[in-house]
Image (cartoon, grey):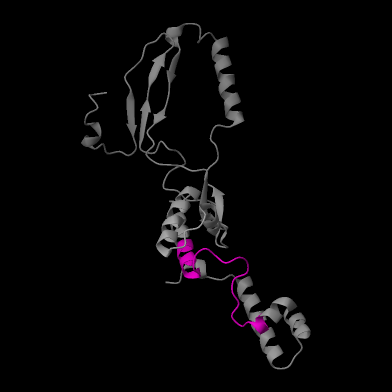
Amino acid sequence: MLSLSKLKTASQVHKELSMEAALREVKDGQSLTSSAKTNGVSRTTLRSRMEKRNPSRVGAPTKFPPWEEDRLVDFLMYCSDQGIPLNRYHCLQLFCEVAIGLGTLEQPMEILAIYLYASLTLRTGKRTEWTVERCEEYISKLQDLHVRGFLERPEQVWNLDETAFTTSEMYGRVIARKGAKQIPSQFDGTEKENVTILPCGNAAGVQLKFKGLYAGKVHVQSRLDDTFGL
């Protein structure tokens, strides 16, 4: 199956066909300037193509061979499409391993330049959940409870908190397919995907037993081993 990263857009195909047409016209005797104008291509590019029929990539030499670079791009886009996007740290580890295997280990930050590849982009996976509006709303509710007399007695003031085990790592910026409107993820945007501990106590110092919440409807007995009934 043809890799999606190797599919060309209509604009890219049009440019290539226009350049090929201009090359044929110049070869048949038409002037370079006239051929470039007729086909809408750059005279400089057309002249370069006449001198070198198989052009190399523009810019500084890449750190990896083109075939290895394309393979890495395919892998990064596959991870993103499967809902497991990788961030810069993941890429640094991956690229260093490849560079060591090729015997061309360069400066780590130079290797990371591959994410600027035409098919990739560095995207924000999720927004910060705690916003200024939500903070002001929370303070307003506390003030309302105080006015209504619900915060006067310590034994009436309870706090239920959420503390999650880091069962999945979420990153603010990840590598994704360029042009994607949404970045898919195996998780719903929270690190509390599998296990959440709920401590609860009041202002008088009374602490209830911790409660553990597990994602899913089926509880495996091994999850409860060595918890001493908590």
User: Which residue is at a point 59% across and 80% down the rendered structure image?
Assistant: 54
Task: Locate residue 217: give its quadrant.
Answer: top left
Q: Is residue 41 visible?
A: no
| Quadrant in which the N terminus appears | bottom left
Residue 68 percent coordinates (x, y): 46, 66
User: Which residue is at a point 34% across and 31% down the rendered structure image?
Assistant: 213
Of the pair 136 and 40, the residue shown nearer to us: 40
Q: Is residue 85 above or below residue 163?
A: below
Residue 51 percent coordinates (x, y): 66, 83
Residue 58 percent coordinates (x, y): 62, 69
Q: Is residue 14 visible?
A: yes
Q: Is residue 23 above or below residue 133?
A: below
Q: Find out whether residue 64 is within the magenta segment.
A: yes
Residue 112 percent coordinates (x, y): 52, 55
Of the pair 5 and 10, the residue shown nearer to us: 5
Residue pushed farthest top? 153
User: Which residue is at a point 52% across and 57% down the rendered structure image?
Assistant: 111
